[in-house]
Structure formats: C-alpha cells, structure tokens
Image (tube, helix red, strand yellow):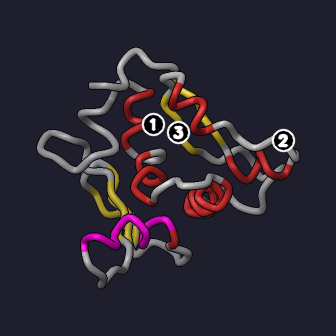
C-alpha cells in the first residue's frame, strides 16, 4: 500500500482547538509523506468522544479538505497505521465485519458529505459480524 512506511500522525481536532494551538499543518504533513488519522482525545478537553464531531471540526478548520479525505482519516488511515489495512477501514471480502449504519437517501456522490455531517446516533453497530444495538 502507498502509506506503508510513512509517518503516522494522530490528530484530535477539538482538543487541538481547546488548547488554542496554532493551525494544524495537515497539508504540510501530507507533503512530507505523513498519513493523518483523526481521533478523540479525552473528556478533559471535549464535551464528548464523538468522532463525527472531530470530523466536522477537522473539515471546518482545513481549507480545501474534501469529505472523502476526512472519511479516510477515520477509516483507511488508522487501519494502515495499525498495519491492518486488509482487515479494518474497508468493506471487502476477508475484512473484519465492523460497521455502523447511518441513515442516507442521497446519491452516491454525496455519501462522504453525509458521513462527515452526520450528527444523530448510529442506527446500529456491528462488531466482528455481530450487531450490538439497533
């Protein structure tokens, strides 16, 4: 994979904002060959551990970032950081059956935007092929 061997950077946008840090150098990190993954830090610097809120904060603070890029920072990039890109962060034969369901009725071209802007609870979650709630 193209990200194998790259520096892996974890970024928590809402904690970054809470502490008043300088703007996160996302594009500079990409240009330097790093892969950026988003996460949540702690309840000490955020009111929730909501990864969707982290995605929205990231999108709102990074000029020109696409919704597809944002979704990759919480799916394929963390999987690559863990060297599990064939099991996590993707939907394909042989991958772990870890999924969430979100309501969506738009076109395929709007799917990434729908994920990033999602603010409701997930409909259901599947971990290792088992639905945990619905």
Q: Marks 2 and 3, how far apart in space?
A: 18 Å
Q: Which residue is denoted by mark 1 in the rendering?
A: 78
Closest to the camera, between mark 2 and mark 1, is 2
Outermost residue, right direction?
20
Of labels 2 and 3, earlier in sequence is 2
Q: Which mark is residue 5?
A: none
Outermost residue, left direction?
93
The answer to whether 123 is drawn above or below residue 105 in the figure is above
Query: Which of the 4 image quadrants contains residue 134?
Result: bottom left
Q: Which residue is denoted by mark 3 in the rendering?
A: 37
Q: Marks 3 and 1, how far apart in space?
A: 5 Å
Left or right, 33 with reference to 126 = right
Tag 2, which secondary structure?
Answer: loop
Of labels 3 and 1, earlier in sequence is 3
Left or right, 2 with reference to 53 = left
Q: Please provide percent x and percent y for residue 97.
A: 25, 50
Chief SS of the magenta region: helix
Of labels 2 and 1, earlier in sequence is 2
Tell me the residue at 30%/84% (across/down): 105
Q: Contact, CB < 8 Å: mark 3 with mark 1?
A: yes
Q: Marks 2 and 1, how far apart in space?
A: 23 Å
Tell me the residue at 54%/22% (across/down): 32
Q: Which residue is denoted by mark 2 in the rendering?
A: 21
Left or right, 53 with reference to 72 = right
| Magenta span | 108-116
Q: Please provide percent x and percent y for residue 31.
A: 52, 28
Using the image as rendered, state which of residue 133 and residue 47 is in the foreground.
Answer: 47
Tell me the residue at 52%/72% (across/down): 117
Tell me the residue at 34%/80% (across/down): 104
Tag 1, which secondary structure?
Answer: helix
């Amino acid at each position: 994979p193209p990200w194998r061997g790259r520096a892996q950077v974890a970024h928590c946008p809402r904690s970054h904002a809470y502490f008043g840090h300088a703007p996160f150098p996302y594009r500079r990190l990409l240009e330097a060959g790093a892969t950026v993954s988003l996460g949540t830090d702690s309840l000490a610097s955020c009111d929730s551990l909501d990864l969707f809120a982290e995605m929205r904060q990231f999108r709102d603070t990074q000029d020109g970032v696409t919704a597809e890029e944002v979704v990759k920072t919480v799916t394929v990039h963390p999987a690559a950081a863990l060297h599990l890109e064939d099991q996590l962060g993707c939907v394909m034969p042989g991958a772990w059956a870890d999924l969430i369901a979100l309501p969506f009725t738009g076109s395929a071209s709007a799917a990434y935007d729908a994920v990033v802007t999602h603010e409701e609870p997930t409909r259901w979650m599947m971990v290792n092929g088992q639905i945990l709630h619905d």
